[in-house]
Image (cartoon, rainbow, N blue to C red):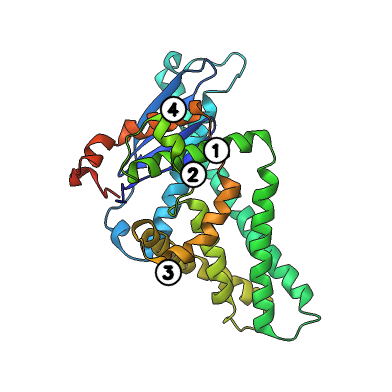
């Protein structure tokens, strides 16, 4: 298997695929047609993306930004606001006002998501562990219990949201995204039939990244020793970027390596993908293929053209 350099994300009724500085948003519209838009990322620093550990946090941040932009774009195709003008009928001033509003909404959503994530996956497990600490004296054991609680909350959260119909469909598109990438990296032509036969699990998945972050945090936080609960929590927050950087390097290695030890360490993240990916139908696979082909020449890649390999 060769590393293709492409990655993506499931969005509302569609798939976003990214290759280098370009990313494509492919959406299945209500009329059953597939709409594809190609965009170029702005503001990313190529030098920072080459610095080990630092690039993990930097890339994760930009993945969130691009992912949210793609999600908002896909959602816009299904808006049914009464009296709303089509984009092509907007004046230049109205277009600028709409863009400013969308940027403000995106910034607010990112901030809110960040605060909620810290509250649910950092503060809540720590708070629960301090309650348990009334009955356990060992700080090391308490830190381990806190980590286990953090993983359990994450798994339960994913399991609960996966029960909703909209999230189920999003996870099906997530499966289509993985299957398309796996199809190419297995050396197969990108056809519906070949994609259908490919696995929906992938080592470079964001789910695996987040799960690795949670696992590594268990062992890192076990070595933090402070009497103040506030300082304990603050140190955990400050160490998150470091843990994310290490986790990114592992995911990057796992995506390129066939080493059995690396494969074994990748298993927990792949197991989590049983929750966050579902088998897509052929319509969803077609959307995934359209997204890939908009930013990646898979035929040249399969032919061994190194210029189209390992782009990111």
The location of residue 295, given as percent across then percent down, is: 31, 35
Q: Which residue is mark 4?
A: 286
Mark 2 neighbour density, 10 Å: few (under 14) some (14–19) many (20 or more) = many
Give the SS element for disc 1: loop
* Mark toward the viewer: 4 or 3: 3
Give the SS element for disc 3: helix
Q: Which residue is mark 1?
A: 279
Query: Spatial distance from mark 2 to mark 1, Cα to Cα?
Result: 7 Å
Q: Nearer the viewer, residue 263 or 236?
A: 263
Task: Identify the residue at image location x=31%, y=47%.
Answer: 4
Where 181 falls versus 192 (above or below)?
below
Q: Earlier in the sequence, mark 3 or mark 2?
A: 2
Q: Which mark is residue 200?
A: 2
Where 215 falls versus 29 (above or below)?
below
Task: Identify the residue at image location x=39%, y=31%.
Answer: 289
The location of residue 311, given as percent across then percent down, is: 27, 48
Q: Which mark is residue 261?
A: 3
Where 222 falls versus 162 (above or below)?
below
Query: Spatial distance from mark 4 to mark 3, Cα to Cα?
Result: 35 Å
* Mark toward the viewer: 4 or 1: 1
- Residue 300 in view of the camera: yes
User: Viewed as shown, does residue 254 lie left or right of 147?
Assistant: left
- Residue 244 in view of the camera: no
The location of residue 61, given as percent across then percent down, is: 45, 52
């Amino acid at each position: 298997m060769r590393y293709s350099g492409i990655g993506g994300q499931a969005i509302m009724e569609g798939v976003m695929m990214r290759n280098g500085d370009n990313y494509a948003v492919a959406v299945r519209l209500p009329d059953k047609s597939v709409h594809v838009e190609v965009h170029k990322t702005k503001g990313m620093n190529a030098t920072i993306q080459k610095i080990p550990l630092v690039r993990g946090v930097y890339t994760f941040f930009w993945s969130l930004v691009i992912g949210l932009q793609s999600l908002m774009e896909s959602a816009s195709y299904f808006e049914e606001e009464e009296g709303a003008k089509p984009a092509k009928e907007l004046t230049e001033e109205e277009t600028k006002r709409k863009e400013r509003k969308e940027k403000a909404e995106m910034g607010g959503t990112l901030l809110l998501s960040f605060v909620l994530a810290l509250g649910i996956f950092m503060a809540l497990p720590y708070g629960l562990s301090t309650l348990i600490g009334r009955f356990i004296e060992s700080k090391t054991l308490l830190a381990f219990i806190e980590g286990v609680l953090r993983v359990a909350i994450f798994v339960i959260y994913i399991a609960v949201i996966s029960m909703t119909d909209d999230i189920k469909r999003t996870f099906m598109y997530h499966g289509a995204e993985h299957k398309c990438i796996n199809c190419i990296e297995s050396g197969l032509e990108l056809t519906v039939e070949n994609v259908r036969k490919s696995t929906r699990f992938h080592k470079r998945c964001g789910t695996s990244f987040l799960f690795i972050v949670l696992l590594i945090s268990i062992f890192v936080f076990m070595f933090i020793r402070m009497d103040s609960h506030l300082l304990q929590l603050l140190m955990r927050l400050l160490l998150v970027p470091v843990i994310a950087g290490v986790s990114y390097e592992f995911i990057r290695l796992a995506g390129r390596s066939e080493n059995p030890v690396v494969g074994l360490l990748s298993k927990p993240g792949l197991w989590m993908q049983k929750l966050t990916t579902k088998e897509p139908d052929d319509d969803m696979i077609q959307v995934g293929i359209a997204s890939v082909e908009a930013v990646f020449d898979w035929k040249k890649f399969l032919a061994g053209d190194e210029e189209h390999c390992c782009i990111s």
